[in-house]
Amino acid sequence: MKSSMKWAAAALAAGVPLCAAQTYTDCDPLNKTCPADTGLDQWSYSVDFTSGSSAFDQWTTTGGTVNSTSLGARFAITEEGDAPTIQTDFYIFFGRVEAKFRCANGTGIISTMVLESDDLDEIDWEQISTFDTYIQTNYYGKGNTTSYDRYTNVDVTDPNGEFHTYAVDWTSERIEWSLDGTVVRTLEYADAVDGTNYPQTPMVVKLGIWAGGDPSNSAGTIEWAGGETDYTAGPFIMYLESVNITNYSPACSYTYSDKTGDYTSITSSNSTCNATSTSTSEKSTLASGSAVASSSAAVYTGGASSLSIGSAVSVVGAGLLAALL
Ligand SMILES: *[C@@H]1O[C@H](CO)[C@@H](O)[C@H](O)[C@H]1NC(C)=O
Ligand SMILES: *[C@@H]1O[C@H](CO)[C@@H](O)[C@H](O)[C@H]1NC(C)=O
Ligand SMILES: *[C@@H]1O[C@H](CO)[C@@H](O)[C@H](O)[C@H]1NC(C)=O
Ligand SMILES: *[C@@H]1O[C@H](CO)[C@@H](O)[C@H](O)[C@H]1NC(C)=O
Ligand SMILES: *[C@@H]1O[C@H](CO)[C@@H](O)[C@H](O)[C@H]1NC(C)=O
Ligand SMILES: *[C@@H]1O[C@H](CO)[C@@H](O)[C@H](O)[C@H]1NC(C)=O
Ligand SMILES: *[C@@H]1O[C@H](CO)[C@@H](O)[C@H](O)[C@H]1NC(C)=O
């Protein structure tokens, strides 16, 4: 968090509009050999966050407590340092993500929906509560933050008071951001520096809130967030009703076969799925189920083994700082 804020200050000092790029990864496949990503091996996944704690079965929570309520998953900032976030335990490789949520209220509070890959491709929705008539769309390719000219502001009615459905439809050819079913932005592959900056590697989905207006942040960051956060006016709460995800390339795992970060370099495999079952029910599922025939000692890793689960929206790696400061 702290370093993110330094970055924010640096960006403002440089006179560029600021957006909160996620710039930390546990293992960047463009620099070294990383473990394969655990994929979603189904075409679609839906979750209703009003349904109780099992709704979080395929998500990892960081930065605070997130609970199922009658309005959906409740993300609350009650004190300095809170940044409740949930992240899928699986990756998708091109797809559609729809999330219905009500952004958090409160000066300086940022609500986000982010798709992010291990090499820091990123597709964002980001709402600054202080400016409650619009929400930003943004994207990054391979962690490239040399300029901040990629965002757009999209008008939205009372994002902190009403639920809206925010969607991203992502293919190898274009990305569409939709608000309540209407496409509000399209990015073609070629428009992102001939594809160089185009998000194109397997992504996890993250949703959460953080306090850009935390009093300990730099003046520049607080200004960007629209003012200082007064925690006594809290708690500041985002509600996430449901998320529907379509994975256009379902598979158990995704591997970067080289260090280009091109989508053509990603290999998908089903060889590690459904392979360790011993129970009768699982065996029968296997037998009747799918093309994956395997009793070999493969390992199904249910978690996001290669991705950081740190504060999703506010972590900046030393590399970027060094580059900027
Ligand atoms: C990966 O390598 C690139 C190019 O050498 C460098 O700019 C980047 O900072 C590195 N990323 C990480 C996470 O170390
Ligand atoms: C809220 O979620 C946390 C995990 O984030 C869990 O430990 C706790 O039991 C939940 N509380 C309720 C009331 O469900
Ligand atoms: C997800 O799908 C369900 C079932 O069709 C629907 O009720 C819900 O509104 C959808 N949520 C989003 C965010 O699109
Ligand atoms: C980073 O993006 C900028 C445009 O925003 C582009 O001019 C530059 O070539 C990109 N750098 C790399 C290494 O792709
Ligand atoms: C958000 O908080 C401000 C300041 O407390 C208040 O004026 C406004 O009505 C609140 N909006 C919503 C939607 O709760
Ligand atoms: C993996 O299995 C899923 C579900 O059975 C299937 O839709 C998908 O095409 C398979 N992918 C590969 C790469 O074989
Ligand atoms: C693994 O098993 C699950 C549950 O039966 C099934 O939905 C999925 O498609 C299977 N995956 C593959 C790759 O066969």
Image (cartoon, rainbow, N blue to C red):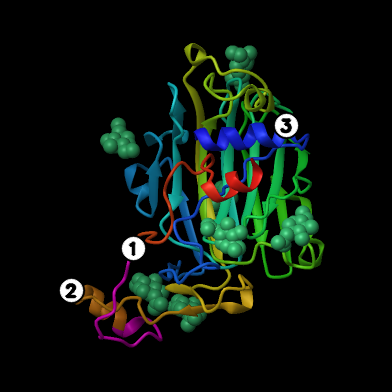
In the image, taking residue 260 as reference, residue 206 lies left or right, namely left
On residue 279, the disc is 2
Magenta run includes residue 289? yes
Is residue 87 magenta-colored? no
Amino acid type assigned to the residue bearing label 3 in the image: Ala
**Residue 247, how many percent across, how many down?**
54, 66
Q: Residue at x 41, y 57 (%)?
A: 89
Q: Find disc 1 in the rendering and name its residue.
A: 302
Look at the image and give the residue range highlighted in magenta: 287-301
Q: Real-space Cα distance between discs 2 and 1? A: 17 Å
Q: In terms of image quadrants, where is residue 120?
A: bottom right
Sooner in the amino-acid sequence: mark 3 or mark 2: 3
Q: Residues within 10 Å of mark 1 (few under 14, many from 20)?
A: some
Dot 2: few (<14), some (14–19), or many (≥20) neighbours within 10 Å? few
Q: Using the image as rendered, state which of residue 61 and residue 198 is in the foreground.
A: 198
Between the C-alphas of marks 1 and 3, the distance is 43 Å
Badge 3 is on which residue? 13
Residue at left offset 59%, top offset 48%: 320
CB of mark 1 within 8 Å of CB of mark 3? no
Can I make out residue 164 in this image?
Answer: yes
